[in-house]
Amino acid sequence: MIEVIVDIVVQIFAAYIVTLALVASKALKRPREIFKGLTPWLEIAGRHPADCRLCTGFWVSIAVWIIAGVTVNPFLIWGASYFLVTQERK
């Protein structure tokens, strides 16, 4: 049982860290701008998914869920990692 809990926590923090790195990191700003230039059709209401923590977090959570093994509902990972990402103070 403890292994499952540890697995879930690791998946949540992995999704959180990767989402934060993709959306908010200065190191990936240039690749993010290139991606946005290559995919302007993804922009909705003036906002691109590359800037959206909710959108990016969803796809990162699905990827982490698949890579780590399908053990729990992916929405648990997505919801918890999104909660952590939105708690950042600027």
Image (cartoon, rainbow, N blue to C red):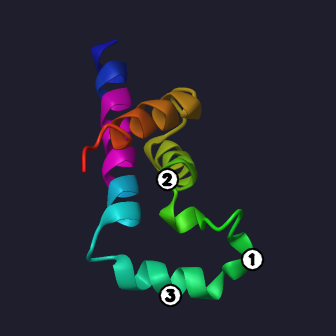
Q: Residue at x 59, y 63 (%)?
A: 49
Residues tagged 3 and 2 counted as in contact (Cβ below 8 A): no
Above or below: residue 14 compared with residue 31: above
Secondary structure, mark 2, is helix
Q: Residue at x 49, y 53 (%)?
A: 60
Q: Earlier in the sequence, mark 2 or mark 1?
A: 1
In the visual, does 90 lie left or right of 49? left
Q: Quick one: 3 or 8, which is closer to the camera? A: 8
Where's residue 39, x and y in %?
66, 81
Question: How many discs mark residues in the rendered view?
Answer: 3
Quarter-of-image position of residue 68 = top left
The CA distance from mark 2 to mark 1 is 20 Å
Q: Point out which mark residue 1 bears.
A: none
Disc 2 designates what residue?
Answer: 60
Q: Earlier in the sequence, mark 3 or mark 1?
A: 3
Where's residue 86, x and y in %?
38, 41
Q: Point out which mark residue 41 bears.
A: 1
Residue 8, magenta (yes or no) = yes
Residue 41, magenta (yes or no) = no
Q: Point out which mark residue 34 bears.
A: 3
Three-letter residue code for mark 1? Trp
Q: Residue at x 52, y 52 (%)?
A: 63
